[in-house]
Amino acid sequence: MTIQPLQIGPVRLATNLLLAPIAGYCDVAFRLVARSYGGVGLACTDLLCPEGVIRENKRSMELAETCPEDAPLALQLYGGNVDLLCEAAMWAEDRADAGLAHVIDINMGCPVDKITKRDGGSKLLCNPDHTLHMVEQIKSCLRHVPLTCKLRLGWDDASIVAPYLARRLEEVGVSMITIHGRTTEMRFGGEARLDGIAAVVAAVKHIPVIGNGDIRTPEDAARMIAHTKCAGVMIGRGALVRPWIFRDTWSYLTTGTIPAEPTIEEKCQMMRNHFYSLCRFRDEQIAVMVFRKRISWYAKTMNGVFGCRPLRDPMRWINSAADFERVLRDFLEWRATREEQLRRGEIDPIQADEESAEVAA
Protein backbone atom coordinates (compact mmCIF):
# COMPACT_ATOMS: atom_id res chain seq x y z
CA MET A 1 0.00 0.00 0.00
CA THR A 2 1.67 3.21 -1.21
CA ILE A 3 0.75 6.25 0.84
CA GLN A 4 1.50 9.69 -0.51
CA PRO A 5 0.32 13.29 -0.08
CA LEU A 6 -2.63 14.40 -2.18
CA GLN A 7 -2.67 16.62 -5.22
CA ILE A 8 -5.95 18.52 -5.77
CA GLY A 9 -5.59 20.23 -9.10
CA PRO A 10 -2.67 22.65 -8.59
CA VAL A 11 -2.84 22.35 -4.78
CA ARG A 12 -0.29 20.01 -3.21
CA LEU A 13 -1.12 18.79 0.31
CA ALA A 14 1.34 17.63 2.95
CA THR A 15 -0.63 14.43 3.66
CA ASN A 16 -3.67 12.51 2.44
CA LEU A 17 -5.74 13.28 5.54
CA LEU A 18 -8.62 15.77 5.64
CA LEU A 19 -10.52 17.31 8.55
CA ALA A 20 -14.27 17.06 7.94
CA PRO A 21 -16.54 20.13 8.09
CA ILE A 22 -18.59 19.14 11.14
CA ALA A 23 -21.29 21.77 11.62
CA GLY A 24 -20.90 23.64 14.88
CA TYR A 25 -17.51 22.14 15.75
CA CYS A 26 -14.81 22.61 13.10
CA ASP A 27 -14.45 26.37 13.19
CA VAL A 28 -11.11 28.11 12.77
CA ALA A 29 -10.27 27.76 16.48
CA PHE A 30 -10.66 23.99 16.44
CA ARG A 31 -8.95 23.66 13.06
CA LEU A 32 -5.89 25.37 14.52
CA VAL A 33 -5.86 22.89 17.40
CA ALA A 34 -5.90 19.93 15.02
CA ARG A 35 -3.28 21.52 12.76
CA SER A 36 -0.97 22.17 15.70
CA TYR A 37 -0.21 18.45 16.00
CA GLY A 38 0.53 18.01 12.30
CA GLY A 39 -0.88 15.55 9.79
CA VAL A 40 -3.82 17.65 8.53
CA GLY A 41 -3.51 17.85 4.76
CA LEU A 42 -6.64 19.94 4.21
CA ALA A 43 -9.35 21.34 6.48
CA CYS A 44 -12.75 22.66 5.49
CA THR A 45 -15.07 25.39 6.68
CA ASP A 46 -18.54 24.72 7.99
CA LEU A 47 -21.28 24.75 5.35
CA LEU A 48 -21.63 28.23 3.89
CA CYS A 49 -24.98 29.51 2.66
CA PRO A 50 -24.50 31.24 -0.74
CA GLU A 51 -26.88 34.09 0.13
CA GLY A 52 -25.05 34.77 3.38
CA VAL A 53 -21.68 34.68 1.65
CA ILE A 54 -22.76 37.08 -1.09
CA ARG A 55 -24.20 39.52 1.45
CA GLU A 56 -21.28 38.89 3.81
CA ASN A 57 -23.64 38.66 6.76
CA LYS A 58 -22.22 38.23 10.24
CA ARG A 59 -22.94 34.52 10.69
CA SER A 60 -21.56 33.52 7.30
CA MET A 61 -18.40 35.53 7.86
CA GLU A 62 -17.90 33.85 11.24
CA LEU A 63 -18.17 30.44 9.56
CA ALA A 64 -15.75 31.51 6.82
CA GLU A 65 -13.25 32.98 9.30
CA THR A 66 -9.67 31.88 8.74
CA CYS A 67 -6.06 33.05 9.10
CA PRO A 68 -2.68 32.34 7.51
CA GLU A 69 -1.98 29.45 9.92
CA ASP A 70 -5.22 27.77 8.84
CA ALA A 71 -3.96 26.53 5.49
CA PRO A 72 -4.61 24.90 3.16
CA LEU A 73 -8.36 25.41 3.50
CA ALA A 74 -11.45 24.50 1.50
CA LEU A 75 -14.51 26.75 1.54
CA GLN A 76 -17.64 24.60 1.42
CA LEU A 77 -20.84 25.85 -0.23
CA TYR A 78 -24.28 24.27 -0.21
CA GLY A 79 -27.60 24.89 -1.89
CA GLY A 80 -29.61 24.24 -5.02
CA ASN A 81 -29.74 27.67 -6.68
CA VAL A 82 -27.06 27.60 -9.35
CA ASP A 83 -26.97 31.38 -9.85
CA LEU A 84 -26.32 31.98 -6.16
CA LEU A 85 -23.77 29.17 -6.03
CA CYS A 86 -21.90 30.61 -9.00
CA GLU A 87 -21.79 34.05 -7.39
CA ALA A 88 -20.67 32.57 -4.05
CA ALA A 89 -18.00 30.48 -5.79
CA MET A 90 -16.58 33.62 -7.39
CA TRP A 91 -16.58 35.28 -3.96
CA ALA A 92 -14.68 32.26 -2.62
CA GLU A 93 -12.16 32.47 -5.47
CA ASP A 94 -11.49 36.08 -4.54
CA ARG A 95 -10.68 34.83 -1.05
CA ALA A 96 -8.34 32.28 -2.61
CA ASP A 97 -6.59 35.04 -4.53
CA ALA A 98 -6.04 36.76 -1.18
CA GLY A 99 -4.46 33.58 0.21
CA LEU A 100 -7.40 32.78 2.48
CA ALA A 101 -8.67 29.66 0.69
CA HIS A 102 -7.28 27.08 -1.68
CA VAL A 103 -10.17 24.82 -2.69
CA ILE A 104 -13.92 25.29 -3.21
CA ASP A 105 -16.14 22.36 -2.25
CA ILE A 106 -19.81 21.73 -3.05
CA ASN A 107 -21.60 19.78 -0.33
CA MET A 108 -23.75 16.96 -1.66
CA GLY A 109 -23.64 14.85 1.47
CA CYS A 110 -25.21 16.66 4.41
CA PRO A 111 -28.36 14.74 5.48
CA VAL A 112 -29.70 17.40 7.88
CA ASP A 113 -33.29 18.46 7.15
CA LYS A 114 -32.68 22.20 7.24
CA ILE A 115 -30.10 21.73 4.47
CA THR A 116 -31.94 19.21 2.29
CA LYS A 117 -35.19 21.19 2.50
CA ARG A 118 -33.35 24.03 0.79
CA ASP A 119 -32.39 21.63 -2.03
CA GLY A 120 -28.84 21.43 -0.71
CA GLY A 121 -26.64 18.75 0.78
CA SER A 122 -27.60 15.19 -0.10
CA LYS A 123 -30.82 16.36 -1.79
CA LEU A 124 -28.57 17.01 -4.79
CA LEU A 125 -28.18 13.23 -5.13
CA CYS A 126 -31.86 12.91 -6.05
CA ASN A 127 -31.43 14.44 -9.52
CA PRO A 128 -27.88 13.64 -10.66
CA ASP A 129 -28.19 15.08 -14.15
CA HIS A 130 -29.49 18.40 -12.86
CA THR A 131 -26.72 18.43 -10.27
CA LEU A 132 -24.09 17.76 -12.95
CA HIS A 133 -25.38 20.68 -15.01
CA MET A 134 -25.21 22.88 -11.92
CA VAL A 135 -21.63 21.86 -11.13
CA GLU A 136 -20.61 22.42 -14.74
CA GLN A 137 -21.90 25.99 -14.52
CA ILE A 138 -20.08 26.61 -11.25
CA LYS A 139 -16.87 25.21 -12.73
CA SER A 140 -17.16 27.53 -15.72
CA CYS A 141 -17.22 30.55 -13.36
CA LEU A 142 -13.87 29.69 -11.77
CA ARG A 143 -10.55 30.74 -13.24
CA HIS A 144 -8.05 28.57 -11.39
CA VAL A 145 -9.24 27.37 -7.96
CA PRO A 146 -9.98 23.61 -7.92
CA LEU A 147 -13.59 22.57 -7.39
CA THR A 148 -14.35 19.45 -5.33
CA CYS A 149 -17.53 17.68 -4.23
CA LYS A 150 -18.51 15.76 -1.11
CA LEU A 151 -21.14 13.02 -1.64
CA ARG A 152 -23.02 10.25 0.09
CA LEU A 153 -23.77 6.93 -1.58
CA GLY A 154 -27.32 8.01 -2.44
CA TRP A 155 -30.56 9.08 -0.84
CA ASP A 156 -31.44 5.49 0.13
CA ASP A 157 -30.58 1.92 -0.83
CA ALA A 158 -32.87 2.11 -3.85
CA SER A 159 -30.99 5.07 -5.32
CA ILE A 160 -27.23 4.50 -5.06
CA VAL A 161 -26.01 7.14 -7.50
CA ALA A 162 -22.54 8.00 -6.18
CA PRO A 163 -20.48 5.90 -8.68
CA TYR A 164 -22.34 7.35 -11.67
CA LEU A 165 -22.26 10.88 -10.28
CA ALA A 166 -18.57 10.70 -9.37
CA ARG A 167 -17.64 9.52 -12.87
CA ARG A 168 -19.60 12.33 -14.49
CA LEU A 169 -18.27 14.93 -12.04
CA GLU A 170 -14.76 14.00 -13.08
CA GLU A 171 -15.77 14.51 -16.70
CA VAL A 172 -17.00 18.08 -16.03
CA GLY A 173 -13.74 19.02 -14.33
CA VAL A 174 -14.11 18.36 -10.59
CA SER A 175 -10.66 17.84 -9.01
CA MET A 176 -11.55 15.53 -6.10
CA ILE A 177 -14.46 13.52 -4.74
CA THR A 178 -15.08 12.79 -1.06
CA ILE A 179 -17.53 9.97 -0.41
CA HIS A 180 -19.21 9.26 2.93
CA GLY A 181 -20.04 5.56 3.03
CA ARG A 182 -23.67 6.00 4.08
CA THR A 183 -26.94 6.95 2.43
CA THR A 184 -28.96 9.98 3.48
CA GLU A 185 -31.54 7.66 5.01
CA MET A 186 -28.84 6.14 7.24
CA ARG A 187 -27.79 9.58 8.48
CA PHE A 188 -25.05 8.64 10.99
CA GLY A 189 -26.41 5.24 11.99
CA GLY A 190 -25.14 1.82 11.05
CA GLU A 191 -21.65 1.36 9.66
CA ALA A 192 -19.98 3.17 6.79
CA ARG A 193 -20.02 0.89 3.75
CA LEU A 194 -16.52 0.30 2.49
CA ASP A 195 -17.76 -1.53 -0.60
CA GLY A 196 -19.78 1.55 -1.53
CA ILE A 197 -16.68 3.74 -1.23
CA ALA A 198 -14.71 1.22 -3.31
CA ALA A 199 -17.33 1.43 -6.07
CA VAL A 200 -16.85 5.20 -6.27
CA VAL A 201 -13.05 4.77 -6.38
CA ALA A 202 -13.44 2.33 -9.25
CA ALA A 203 -15.75 4.69 -11.15
CA VAL A 204 -13.22 7.52 -11.62
CA LYS A 205 -10.00 7.44 -13.63
CA HIS A 206 -7.65 10.20 -12.63
CA ILE A 207 -8.88 12.32 -9.69
CA PRO A 208 -8.44 11.34 -6.02
CA VAL A 209 -11.34 9.85 -4.10
CA ILE A 210 -11.39 10.42 -0.33
CA GLY A 211 -13.17 7.97 1.97
CA ASN A 212 -15.20 9.23 4.92
CA GLY A 213 -17.06 7.59 7.78
CA ASP A 214 -16.19 5.81 11.04
CA ILE A 215 -12.49 6.77 11.16
CA ARG A 216 -11.74 6.84 14.88
CA THR A 217 -8.25 5.32 14.95
CA PRO A 218 -5.22 5.15 12.65
CA GLU A 219 -6.03 1.49 12.10
CA ASP A 220 -9.50 2.44 10.83
CA ALA A 221 -7.91 4.72 8.23
CA ALA A 222 -5.47 2.04 7.09
CA ARG A 223 -8.31 -0.47 6.83
CA MET A 224 -10.42 1.87 4.71
CA ILE A 225 -7.57 2.66 2.34
CA ALA A 226 -6.61 -1.01 1.99
CA HIS A 227 -10.20 -2.12 1.35
CA THR A 228 -11.37 0.67 -0.95
CA LYS A 229 -8.10 1.85 -2.58
CA CYS A 230 -9.17 5.43 -1.80
CA ALA A 231 -6.44 8.05 -2.07
CA GLY A 232 -6.99 9.40 1.44
CA VAL A 233 -9.45 9.71 4.28
CA MET A 234 -11.54 12.45 5.83
CA ILE A 235 -11.85 12.35 9.62
CA GLY A 236 -14.69 14.01 11.50
CA ARG A 237 -16.04 12.94 14.86
CA GLY A 238 -12.88 11.00 15.69
CA ALA A 239 -10.97 14.29 15.65
CA LEU A 240 -13.31 15.94 18.15
CA VAL A 241 -12.14 13.58 20.88
CA ARG A 242 -8.53 13.25 19.69
CA PRO A 243 -7.41 16.25 17.63
CA TRP A 244 -3.98 14.60 17.34
CA ILE A 245 -5.49 11.71 15.31
CA PHE A 246 -4.09 13.20 12.08
CA ARG A 247 -0.55 13.13 13.46
CA ASP A 248 -1.02 9.55 14.65
CA THR A 249 -2.67 8.39 11.44
CA TRP A 250 -0.07 9.87 9.11
CA SER A 251 2.67 8.30 11.23
CA TYR A 252 0.92 4.93 11.19
CA LEU A 253 0.28 5.00 7.44
CA THR A 254 3.85 5.98 6.59
CA THR A 255 5.94 4.28 9.28
CA GLY A 256 3.67 1.72 10.94
CA THR A 257 4.11 3.38 14.34
CA ILE A 258 1.79 5.54 16.47
CA PRO A 259 3.34 8.29 18.63
CA ALA A 260 2.73 8.40 22.36
CA GLU A 261 -0.53 10.03 23.37
CA PRO A 262 -0.16 13.61 24.61
CA THR A 263 0.28 13.91 28.36
CA ILE A 264 -2.39 15.39 30.59
CA GLU A 265 -0.35 18.59 30.79
CA GLU A 266 -0.13 18.75 27.00
CA LYS A 267 -3.86 18.19 26.69
CA CYS A 268 -4.50 21.04 29.12
CA GLN A 269 -2.27 23.28 27.03
CA MET A 270 -4.21 22.19 23.94
CA MET A 271 -7.41 23.27 25.70
CA ARG A 272 -5.80 26.63 26.48
CA ASN A 273 -4.84 27.09 22.85
CA HIS A 274 -8.40 26.29 21.79
CA PHE A 275 -9.95 28.59 24.38
CA TYR A 276 -7.78 31.59 23.52
CA SER A 277 -8.22 31.03 19.79
CA LEU A 278 -11.95 31.29 20.42
CA CYS A 279 -11.30 34.54 22.28
CA ARG A 280 -9.21 35.76 19.35
CA PHE A 281 -11.72 35.00 16.61
CA ARG A 282 -14.95 35.48 18.55
CA ASP A 283 -14.90 36.73 22.14
CA GLU A 284 -14.43 35.56 25.72
CA GLN A 285 -18.09 34.76 26.34
CA ILE A 286 -18.29 32.61 23.22
CA ALA A 287 -15.18 30.76 24.40
CA VAL A 288 -16.80 30.20 27.79
CA MET A 289 -20.01 28.84 26.26
CA VAL A 290 -18.13 26.57 23.87
CA PHE A 291 -15.99 25.07 26.62
CA ARG A 292 -18.93 24.45 28.92
CA LYS A 293 -20.13 22.08 26.18
CA ARG A 294 -16.86 20.86 24.69
CA ILE A 295 -15.32 19.78 27.98
CA SER A 296 -17.15 16.46 27.71
CA TRP A 297 -15.25 15.76 24.46
CA TYR A 298 -11.87 16.65 25.93
CA ALA A 299 -12.59 14.75 29.13
CA LYS A 300 -13.09 11.48 27.25
CA THR A 301 -9.31 11.07 26.92
CA MET A 302 -8.34 12.47 30.33
CA ASN A 303 -9.58 9.86 32.76
CA GLY A 304 -6.37 7.94 33.36
CA VAL A 305 -5.95 6.45 36.80
CA PHE A 306 -7.57 9.31 38.67
CA GLY A 307 -10.53 10.29 36.53
CA CYS A 308 -11.38 13.77 35.31
CA ARG A 309 -14.37 14.85 37.39
CA PRO A 310 -12.41 17.74 39.04
CA LEU A 311 -11.89 19.10 35.52
CA ARG A 312 -15.14 18.20 33.81
CA ASP A 313 -17.68 19.31 36.40
CA PRO A 314 -16.26 22.76 37.34
CA MET A 315 -15.59 23.58 33.67
CA ARG A 316 -19.32 23.40 33.02
CA TRP A 317 -19.84 26.37 35.33
CA ILE A 318 -17.10 28.77 34.20
CA ASN A 319 -18.02 32.39 33.42
CA SER A 320 -14.70 33.90 32.37
CA ALA A 321 -11.15 33.24 31.21
CA ALA A 322 -10.07 33.58 34.84
CA ASP A 323 -12.48 30.79 35.79
CA PHE A 324 -11.13 28.67 32.94
CA GLU A 325 -7.55 29.12 34.17
CA ARG A 326 -8.54 28.40 37.77
CA VAL A 327 -10.24 25.12 36.83
CA LEU A 328 -7.22 23.95 34.83
CA ARG A 329 -4.83 24.96 37.61
CA ASP A 330 -6.88 23.23 40.32
CA PHE A 331 -7.17 20.09 38.19
CA LEU A 332 -3.43 19.85 37.56
CA GLU A 333 -2.65 20.48 41.24
CA TRP A 334 -5.17 17.81 42.25
CA ARG A 335 -3.58 15.32 39.84
CA ALA A 336 -0.08 16.14 41.11
CA THR A 337 -1.23 15.50 44.69
CA ARG A 338 -2.87 12.20 43.72
CA GLU A 339 0.22 11.07 41.83
CA GLU A 340 2.37 11.81 44.88
CA GLN A 341 -0.06 9.88 47.10
CA LEU A 342 0.10 6.97 44.67
CA ARG A 343 3.90 7.07 44.66
CA ARG A 344 3.93 6.96 48.46
CA GLY A 345 1.55 4.03 48.52
CA GLU A 346 -1.22 6.07 50.16
CA ILE A 347 -3.64 5.16 47.33
CA ASP A 348 -4.48 1.67 46.13
CA PRO A 349 -3.88 1.87 42.32
CA ILE A 350 -6.48 -0.83 41.61
CA GLN A 351 -9.13 1.00 43.64
CA ALA A 352 -8.18 4.31 41.97
CA ASP A 353 -8.54 2.74 38.54
CA GLU A 354 -11.93 1.29 39.44
CA GLU A 355 -13.10 4.68 40.71
CA SER A 356 -11.92 6.29 37.49
CA ALA A 357 -13.83 3.77 35.37
CA GLU A 358 -16.95 4.35 37.46
CA VAL A 359 -16.71 8.13 36.99
CA ALA A 360 -16.14 7.74 33.24
CA ALA A 361 -19.20 5.51 32.90
Image (spheres, rainbow, N blue to C red):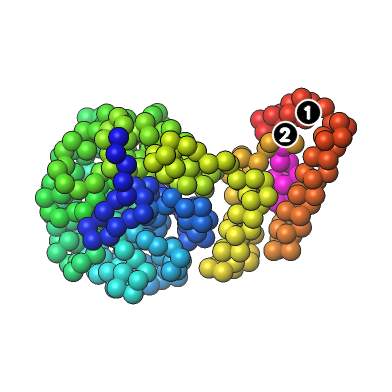
Which residue shows up at 58% across the image and 41% down it?
261
Residue under label 1: 349
Viewer-proximal residue among 307 and 182? 307
**Dot 2, crowdedness within 10 Å: few (<14), some or many (≥20)?**
some
Q: Are marks 2 and 1 in contact (CB under 8 Å)?
A: yes
Inspect this view and state whether residue 325 appears. Answer: yes
Image coords of residue 134 (percent x, y): 17, 56
Give the left or right position of residue 39, taking residue 262 as reference: left
The image shows residue 156, relative to residue 334, as above or below, that is above
Q: Which residues are magenta?
A: 307-315
Q: Secondary structure at mark 2?
A: loop
Identify the mark at residue 305; answer none if there is no mark.
Answer: 2
Left or right of 354? Residue 57 is left
State the image coordinates of residue 89 (x, y, percent, origin top left).
Answer: 26, 65
Q: Quadrant of the C terminus?
A: top right
x and y percentages locating residue 83 in the rendered image: 20, 65
Q: As rendered, which of 347 and 144 lies closer to the eye?
A: 347
Q: Is residue 183 left or right of residue 66?
A: left
Q: Is residue 152 visible?
A: no
